[in-house]
Each structure stands twice: as C-alpha cells, then as structure tokens.
Image (tube, rainbow, N blue to C red):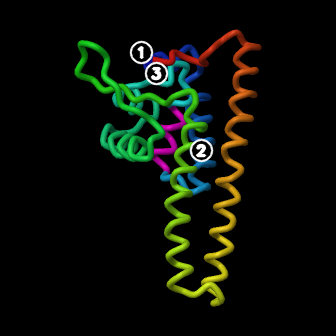
Amino acid sequence: MSTETTEGRIEGRDAEAFLRFVERFASVLADGGWPRMPARVFVCLLAVDSGRLTAAELAEALRVSPAAISGAVRYLGQVSLISREREPGSRRDVYRVRDDVWYEAAVRKDRALTRWETSLREGIEVLGPDSPAGRRMTETLEFFEFVQGELPGLLERWRVVRDQLRARTGKSQLSDPS
C-alpha cells in the first residue's frame, strides 16, 4: 500500500489535512500521557483505511526519520496497540492497528486491574488498613474492584452496540480482518 505522499495525497486525501488531523489527535493523546511519537504513529495507522503501513510509509506520511518510527512501533507493540506482520514473500514488516483496538485494550486493562488489586492488598497489609496511606490504598482497591466488576457488562454492551452498527453499515469488519 502506498501512502502517495509524493503527489500531496495520502489514500486520495489531502496530505496536509491528513497530517494536521494526525498531529491534533496525537496531541490530545500526548496530553493524556501517551509518548508523543507513538501517539503520532498510532493515529496515523488509525487514520489510513487499511490500518496497515510499513515503517517507510509511516516515516514518509509523518515526515520523520525511520529511527523515530522504530522506537514508536516498538513501544506500541509492547503495549499491544499494534501488531507487526509480514507480507507473504516480503522482507518488510507491516504495522497494523486492529479495528477493535480499544475493546482489546479494555480487556487487557481488566487483566492489569487484577494485578494491581493484588499489589494493593499487599500494600494495605504492610501499611495497616487504619493508617492514612492504608485508607488511600483501600479506597484505590475498592475503586479498582468496582471498575473491574463493571467492565464485563460495559464490554458486553459495547459488543451489542458494535454489532448493531456493523449490521446497519452491512459490514462485519470496518476493514480487512486478516
């Protein structure tokens, strides 16, 4: 897939407008705590129809060095927001964001909450449940338990809404599921 930036277009879209959008959304993510370059790469992958680009295509679209892309895709892969694939017969890696990336991130967060709860219980025991720090830990634990208890229902409701959306648009996937 070519990003077609040499003609001022990315997938038939105005490249400058595309890049402005990527930069604005990446800034919002960065303001929320994301590292800047991974945010830019993630938004770029979200914004292309296929959800797939090579490192060279990402560098070209974002007007950055391949080294900047390398660090960003490594980070995004480590936090499971993108996957690295290889085209059959090619030596080039393709980076892909799945259509259900936010759903999958929420499922992973559920698993992380379990680990955090275990650590918090240990902290409460060490600090004492009646100390100011122990009470903060207890409230944090109770919040995480509440969120974890609500998350399965929330995710199920999302699946229903998503399926209805896909039924209305006549598509089982927003892009190629492979």
The kind of residue tagged 2 is Ala
Local secondary structure at mark 1: loop
Image position of 97 with respect to 140: above or below? above
Q: Quadrant of the C terminus?
A: top left
Query: Which sits in the foreground, 75 or 166?
Result: 166
The residue that appears at 41% across and 15% down in the rendered structure is: 1
CA gap, disc 1 to disc 2?
30 Å
* Mark whose residue sits in front, 3 or 1: 1
Question: Where does residue 139 sit, x and y in percent of width and height?
Answer: 68, 73
Secondary structure mostly taken by the magenta-highlighted segment of the chain:
helix
Residue 5: mark in rendering = 3
The residue that appears at 65% across and 61% down in the rendered structure is: 145
For label 1, count other residues whose C-alpha is less than 10 Å away and answer few (under 14), some (14-19) or many (20+).
few
CA gap, disc 3 to disc 2?
34 Å
Image position of 176 with respect to 99: above or below? above
The kind of residue tagged 1 is Met
Is the Cβ of the residue at disc 3 closer than 8 Å to that at disc 2?
A: no
Q: Residue furthest bottom?
A: 131
Is the Cβ of the residue at disc 1 closer than 8 Å to that at disc 2?
A: no
Query: Which sits in the foreground, 19 or 29?
Result: 29
The stretch of residues the image draws in magenta is: 36-44
Query: Does residue 47 belong to the magenta stretch?
Result: no
The residue beneath circle 2 is 106
Q: Residue furthest top?
A: 170
**To which quarter of the image does residue 53 belong?**
top left
Query: Which sits in the foreground, 123 or 11?
Result: 123
Local secondary structure at mark 2: helix
